Image (tube, rainbow, N blue to C red):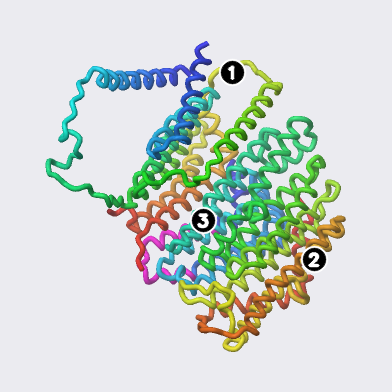
Amino acid sequence: MIALPLFGFFALLTVGSALIVSFSRSIVYSGFALLGTFFGAAGFYLFLSSDFVAVTQVLIYVGGVLVLILFAIMLTNKIEDATTSNPSLNRIAGAVLTFVLFLFLVGILSGTDWVVQDEEKFASMVTPIGNALLSSYLLPFEVISIALLAALLGAVVLVRREVR
Amino acid sequence: MTILFLAMAKALAPFLALVLSGLLLLIVTAFLPKEKTRLLFYPTLLALAGTTILVATNWVDGFPLEGGMVISDRIAYGFDLVFLLSVFLSTILSRETEEGNAHGGEYYVLTLFATAGMVLMAHSRDLLLLFIALEIMSLSAYILTSYRQSAKGAEAGMKYFVMGAFASGFLLYGIALIYGATGSTDFSVITQAGAGATGNSLWLIRIGVALLLIGFGFKIAAVPFHFWAPDVYEGAPTPVTALMASGVKAAGFVALVRLVIAFAPFTALPWVKILSVLAFLTMTIGNLIALKQTNIKRMLAYSSIAHAGYALVGLAASIKNGQIQEEALAAVLFYMFAYSLMTIGAFAIVVAMGRKGDEVDEIGDYAGLSEHHPALAAAMALFMISLTGIPPTLGFIGKFYLLRAAVSSGLIGLTVVAVLNSVISAFYYLSVVMVIYFQKEKGYRLPQLSYTLLFAVSFTAMAVIYLGLFPEELFQVAKQSFQAVVF
Amino acid sequence: MQEYGKILLLFTFGGLFVASFLLLSNFLGVKRFTREKHLPYECGIDSSPNLLNRFSVKFYLVAILFILFDVEVVFLYPWAILYKDFVLRGDGLFMLLEMLVFLSTLVVGLVYIYGKRALDW
């Protein structure tokens, strides 16, 4: 009963922020609007009973990636001068094509036989994910540490001062 | 649980060896003074050589080890040998460019991590592990591409990274769809569960496989996913380009081979058609655009795209009526060996022709090589002839095996196209030979020669000639790798 | 689910609170334009605009390293929640070793950062 307006709120938040990100003239506005998009996505994950993914989303995307994006925006010199890279916008053709795609998608979505299941109770996902991560998916878990190490190495290598 | 763990550790021995040596070198790099980082060259080669011996003895044993998500059968070990050979030779090349010197340490560590990623890709039986291994290899490759702090290197690294991340997105979506359709990401479960798929789940599998092909097609620079390759190959330091052209490409192919083996019984998927179209486009467009190149690294990039196309012919020939044709897959593995040797030889000479950090890039700069260094000129001519596929070189034998497999699978049209493409490729390969021997030199630059480079060039040249004359042993190795396909 | 609803409520009230204050001050506040109020503040002195604000790239390195170790922490959470159950089941040592292997790879990274003085300003 309260779920539908709540879902609508999150949907509005996500899509609205995404529109601001795409269409805003100022890149700083886009960067900050991305915050709304990420929070909206976290809300969606909660609706799907994936609380672990939702918290991870907020922790890593908002706390890490978004901060990094804002750093990059602020570190880039004269970024206010950077406008849309492609001046040939083809607005009419783009709008028509997007609208046709939209109609296509709406048609498919309304014509599909959705298998509607009974609403499941919210079950915390942390324990099953943890169990899986530490038993059947142990090897990918350990190997991910090497991927993180490679990224770490890359960050330090690329940022070092040129010695020439 | 611990038993499974130990079984996995044994099956993963090559991967663990590479990772542990990488970690060790990383700690050493952190505390080594700058002048001494050159010395890390030797431990890296030692690690690679040690892993090669480990893999070779395991291959000879021939007993497939399985543990959870890992499978160590001869297919994996065979491709491991390709990876290790390519990386070994590329690392030798790096000695003479500045990567191995001033900021040395991390270069070698990243090379070892990239190799570890490739090896894990060959050994994985699960799509999830395959993806993570792909990411390890790709991350290391992205960083290696932009290792030299120049504008060109940064541009190349940026392009590679952005396009690679995009392709990973496709890959993940494909994996998710296949998981949705079959309930697992393990290859053996997919093959069983999906074989009887109908209706909706069949469509999910179809789209999932298409997305997987897009993702892997990017990695091997197949057309129309090849746009990143020339810029990236040109902007990266040449030893890294050699590594990418041989090792990374072979890693993409091992993933495709696993995919083909897993999905072969799905007769509802038009495998042969898709792979044939991909092969046709890749060969043709790669060769046609290479005709117009004047920069040797870009030319070699397009040539490597074309060679991926030839190998795709072999892949297309490997499924016939839902059965796997082992000869075709063996031809693909053989071609990976052959192609790596030829390409690294060519890149070795490109490295030789340049000074430290300032490489000779235009084909015209090779004029006059025949008078000053006849041996190098002969070697380059040999590599160009082999890449074209003229007997009795290794390139010819490789293509012969591929096309023989294609003919026996009934892909006559594709065979004709491949032969025509070889003829087209003769134009640009042999033009390099013409420039070397017949063009008047203008300002000849003395190449830096050293023992390591000479070793690399002579080893690859001798391998090309020897294996061109006596390919049977290597082909038998390749064939036996695919004999008992375990899934 | 109820706990997350409470968090949402917290966010909503916080947002409404802040928004109401801003809007109220916008509508109720007096606006008088004075030239001095619109100059950039620099500790009282007059200065010409400083255009070349080159930020050091070290900030970026810190942020990237933060993300990487943050991802490591995210992987630590489920393990930490389940560790007690594992100890009770008798698998405690094995699980500890697993996590130590995971952490040690990243500790090697930490040692590397320390040795290369990457975080030294």
The magenta stretch spans residue C34:
no
Protein chain holding label 2? B
Is residue B45 left or right of B223 when viewed as pictured?
left
Q: Residue at x 54, y 52 (%)?
A: B136
Q: Which mark is residue B142?
A: 3
Amino acid type indicated by mark 3: Tyr
Q: Secondary structure at mark 1?
A: loop
- Residue A149 versus residue C67 in the image, above or below: below
Local packing at callout 2 (Cα closer than 10 Å; few below 14, some 14-19, many 20+) is some
Protein chain holding label 3? B
Is there CB contact under 8 Å for labels 1 and 2?
no
Local packing at callout 3 (Cα closer than 10 Å; few below 14, some 14-19, many 20+) is many
Tag nearer the camera, 1 or 2 = 2
Residue A55 seen in the figure? no
Amino acid type indicated by mark 1: Glu
Which circle's residue, 2 or 3, is located before the other in the chain? 3
Question: Label 2 vs label 3: CA separation?
Answer: 34 Å
Residue B154: x and y, percent? 46, 58
Q: Nearer the viewer, residue A161 or B330?
A: A161
Tag nearer the camera, 3 or 1 = 3
Q: Residue at x 43, y 51 (%)?
A: A152
Residue B4: x and y, percent? 62, 44
The answer to whether dots 1 and 2 both sit on one chain is no
Q: Which residue is mark 2?
A: B419
**Looking at this rendering, what residue extends furthest in the bottom direction?**
B371
**Looking at this rendering, what residue extends furthest in the top direction?**
A1
Q: Which residues are magenta?
A: B18-41
Q: Secondary structure at mark 2?
A: helix
